[in-house]
Image: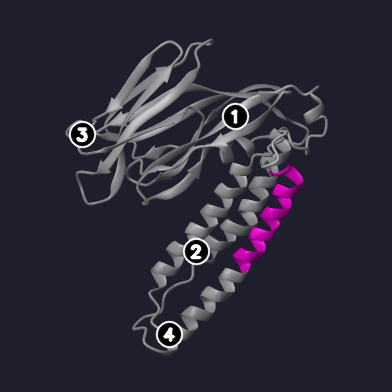
Amino acid sequence: MTITVKTVSDTYGGSGGSNSDDFHIIIYQIIDGESINNINVKSIKVQTDPTSGYLNSLQFIYNVETNYGKRIVNGSLRGLRTGKLQTYDLNSNEKMKTITGSYGNNSIDINIVIKYLKFQTSAETISYGKNDTADTLFTFPAGILFGNSAYAVDSLGTYVIVEVPTNSSTTSNPLSTTSNSSSDITSTSFIILSCFTNILGLIVLVTVDELVEIGDKRHCNKPYPIDTGLVHYSGLAQMAHNYLIVQATSVSSEEMFYKTKNTINQSVIDYLKKLQVSA
């Protein structure tokens, strides 16, 4: 058996914080010749604020099964490790089904953050945080977490994975598509498109450098520092990340490419907002 990404959910919550991706963490522990057979949530760790009752932090612990055996992988800690710690351990036959929750203004400033989460498993329903009537509700399928966080859980989404038999004719080539849908992007095309996106990222870097130079010469009162690591990650590192996902999981999902593209596009938009260069 191997796995493929079936869908990538929408991202729910605010726009603050820094991105973290549990799939990225899992993939980068895979060694040469190893392939992933299955990934399941082993434990949920959360902390809630003792005063407001809102969610402070979230972390998934995963059981990762590969052709080399089993391992436990700690997902990213999202938010601050403060408040009341609560842990829910799934039993060996228990599976995560759906995740629901709400987001809204936090109690400190106007930032939009995740304030409440409810997890539906095959055996239990557990909830953490506080659900306010004015907040926005959301639901997405259980999977591997991604999203933004800083001092709170700013946003969340999931990769939904499925098992694929290795003896299937659609997966005989680990870099071939695992879907018969005409809308799917094959793994080879995915890598090519990622390379193209990387080139665009480098073009953006040059363009941003020119904008700052023009802005400094005209009306800017202070220089705006260039965080070259931002575009570099969006290009080279993201491309390498995508390639490893393709190799380890036989991923061929169209959603994976468009999530990458949208991540880079949003990085560029946020970056240009920071510049505030007057023409």
64 to the left or right of 107: right
- Residue that label 2 marks: 268
Mark 3 residue crowding within 10 angstroms, few (<14) / some (14–19) / many (20+): some
Q: Mark 2 or mark 4: name the one nearer the start of the chain.
A: 4
- Residue that label 1 marks: 161
233 to the left or right of 196: left
Question: What amino acid is labelled 2 in the image?
Answer: Val
Question: Is disc 1 placed on a helix, strand or loop?
Answer: strand
Q: Mark 3 or mark 1: name the one nearer the start of the chain.
A: 3
The correct choice, above or below, for 163 with respect to 29 in the image is: above
Question: Is disc 3 placed on a helix, strand or loop?
Answer: loop
**Mark 2 and mark 3: Cα distance apart in space:** 33 Å
The residue positioned 37% from the left and 47% from the top of the image is 150
Which one is in front, 46 or 182?
182
Q: Which residues are magenta?
A: 185-202
The residue positioned 43% from the left and 50% from the top of the image is 18
In percent of width and height, residue 254 lies at 63, 43
